[in-house]
Amino acid sequence: MAALRGLRGGLPPFDGEREADHWVRLREVVRSLREQAGVGRADHAVDFAEQVVEVLCSAAQQVTGNAGELPELMQQALSAHALACRRSRPDPHRLASWLVRLQLNYPDGPEVALSEYAEALGPEGIAAYRRTARRACRELPTVPFGRTPRYDRRRWAVVRLMEELALYTGDVDVEVQWLATDLSTPWQYLRIATVLEDAGRTAEALAWVERGLVATQGSRAEVRLVDVAVDACLRLGKTTRALQLARNAFRDWPGLDTYLRLRTVADRADRWPAQREWARRWLRAQAEDTTRNSVLVQILMWDGEIDAAWRAATEHGCADHVWAALAEERVMRHPEQVLPVYRRLVRRRVAVGGAEHAAEVADLLDGLGLAWEKTADDGRAKFHRYLEELKRECAGDRALLTELARRGL
C-alpha cells in the first residue's frame, strides 16, 4: 500500500535508482492483487482491485513524461478485478456503476471488455450498465450536418463505451444512439440506416434516410441516400414514394446513373414509358446547358437511338467524352460525319498535353484512321500524312510519341 500512497500525488521526478525501486513496489502491489483475486478472499480482492485501478489511472493522468509500465499495470489490475468479480459475484448494480464511472472518469485508462464481466454482472447488471451508458450518451450534444466534430475526452469516452456495449450485446438501439451523436456527414445517416436495415427495421431505416435527405440537400451524397430510400420504399410497398424520390434524384443530379435508377423504379410501377418521356422532355427544355445536353445524348445512345443522339449533339453540343463515344457508334455507318469530330477532339486533347492524355489521343487517332479509311480510297494515305504532321508538331511530347509507337501509329 505504500506504493499506492506514493502514487496518489502523482509520479515525482525520481532519480534512476529510486525510480526503479518505485516501479518494483508497484509491480509487487499488482502481483499481490492478482494472487489475492485468484486464491484469496475474492470479496476483499474486489475492493482492493478497484483502489489499485483508480490510483493507477489517477497517477497516469498526472504523468507528463514517460509513463513507464503504468498502462500495462493498469490492465493487469483490471484483469485481476474481473477475476475477483467472477469469483465473488458483487452487487451487479454497484459493479455496473463502477465500470461505467471508470471509463468516463479515466478515458486513457485500461480497456474494459464486457465479456470479462458478463458472468459477474448477469442480466441485471448488464441492464444497469446499459441504462447508465445510454444516459451518459444522451447528455452528449449532437454534431449537426456540416459541422466538424470535436472529440474531447468526455465524448470520446462515451462513444467508446457505447461502441463496446453495442458490440457485446448486439443491441441495435445502442449502436444507433451512439452513431446519432455525430450527424456531421451524409455517411452517418447511411450507417444508421444500414444498421437498422440489417436488423430488419426497414421503416426506421427509411425514416433516418428521409432525415438525411432533408439535412444534405445539394450534396452529391444525396444520390446514395436516395438509393437507400428507394430500396426501403420498394420493400415497404411504397412505390409512389419511391418513384417520386427517383424523379427528384434525376432532376437534381441528371445523369445516366440516375436515369437508369428511375427506369428500375418506374418498371416496378409499370410506368416507365411515361417517365422516360418526362425525363427526355425535361432535358430538352434545358438543352442550351451543354452538361444537361450531354446527359440527353448519353441517354439516347443508351436507348439505341443513335441518330437522335447525333442530332441532339449537333444542335446543342456536348462534352468531349460524349462526342468520342458517339463518334465511335457512328464511324462505320457515317464516317464522313465523324471525321471532323475526331480531328477536333484530337486537337483538343493534344493541346491539353500530359502523360495522362496520351492514351486518349491514341484512342481518338485509331477512330480517326478508321473514319478516313472508310471515307475515301486514299483515306489511309491521308491519315498517315496527317499523323506524320501531328508527330512533328508534338516532337516535344515524349509521352504521346511513346504511346503512339507502342500502338504502332
Image: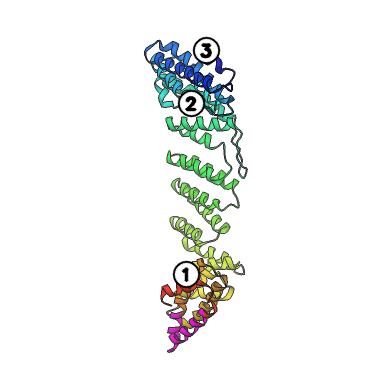
Please name the amino acid that badge 3 sits on. Answer: Ala
Distance, label 3 to label 1, CA atoms, is 75 Å
Tell me: residue 272, above or below residue 52: below
Residue 96 placed where, x, y %? 48, 20
Please tell me how crowded label 1 is: few (under 14), some (14-19), or many (20+) other residues with Cα within 10 Å. Answer: some
What is the quadrant of the C terminus in the image? bottom left
Please name the amino acid that badge 1 sits on. Answer: Ala
Query: Where does label 1 land, which residue?
Result: 359
Tell me: residue 60, above or below residue 36: below
Q: How many marks?
A: 3
Q: Nearer the viewer, mark 3 or mark 1?
A: 3
**Mark sitting earlier along the chain (3/2):** 3
Disc number placed over residue 2 in the picture, else none? 3
Tell me: residue 247, above or below residue 120: below
Please name the amino acid that badge 2 sits on. Answer: Glu
Q: Which residues are magenta?
A: 369-391
Q: Residue furthest bottom?
A: 377
Query: Where does label 2 land, which residue?
Result: 69
Residue 81 in the figure: left or right of residue 349: left
Residue 242 placed where, x, y %? 50, 51
User: Mark 3 and 2 residues: CB-CB less than 8 Å, in contact?
Assistant: no
